Image: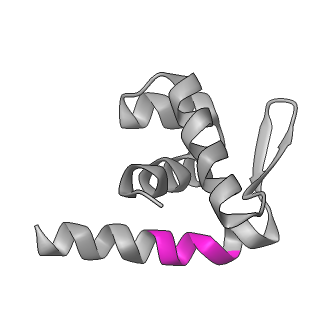
Amino acid sequence: MELHQLEYFVAVAEEGSFTRAAERVHVAQPGVSAQIGRLERELGQQLFDRAGRTVRLTEVGAAVLPYARAALGAVGAAR
């Protein structure tokens, strides 16, 4: 698990879109999708329901989100 993966995860969760999340983090959309896929494989769970253009957190994604935000907040505080 890498910090940029958590950053992308939080961005997708908050934006509700891989495209808008990619714009927010200044990365191409396929890069965000690939990193989210790697994170999901590492966790062994899907974090998002992807139905067409709609992206919603799964139960697991909703459970992981506060931890991702806390980790990013801790790193920001340490800096």
Number of numbered markers = 0
Colour scheme of the picture: one colour
The correct choice, above or below, for 53 with respect to 10 in the image is above
Residue 48 magenta: no
Q: At x 55% / y 41%, what residue is drawn? A: 35
* Location of residue 42 in the rendering, given as x and y in whole percent from the top left corner: 63, 60
Report the span colored magenta.
Answer: 63-68
User: Where does residue 52 sit, x and y in percent of width and height?
Assistant: 87, 30
- Answer with left or right where residue 7 lies relative to residue 21: left
User: Residue 62 location in percent, x, y?
Assistant: 69, 71
Task: Please give left or right for residue 78 compared with residue 33 in the image.
Answer: left
Check the picture and name the quadrant holding the C terminus. bottom left
Instruction: In the rendered view, tell whether residue 25 sits above or below residue 39.
Output: above
Which of the two residues, 5 or 16, is positioned nearer the viewer here? Answer: 5
**Quick one: which residue is furthest to the left in this view?**
79
In percent of the image, x 14 and y 74: which residue is there? 78
Q: Magenta segment, principal secondary structure?
A: helix
Q: Position of residue 1 (x, y in %)?
A: 48, 61
Q: Nearer the viewer, residue 3 or 65?
A: 3
Q: Is residue 16 left or right of residue 22?
A: right
Q: Residue at x 39, y 49 (%)?
A: 4
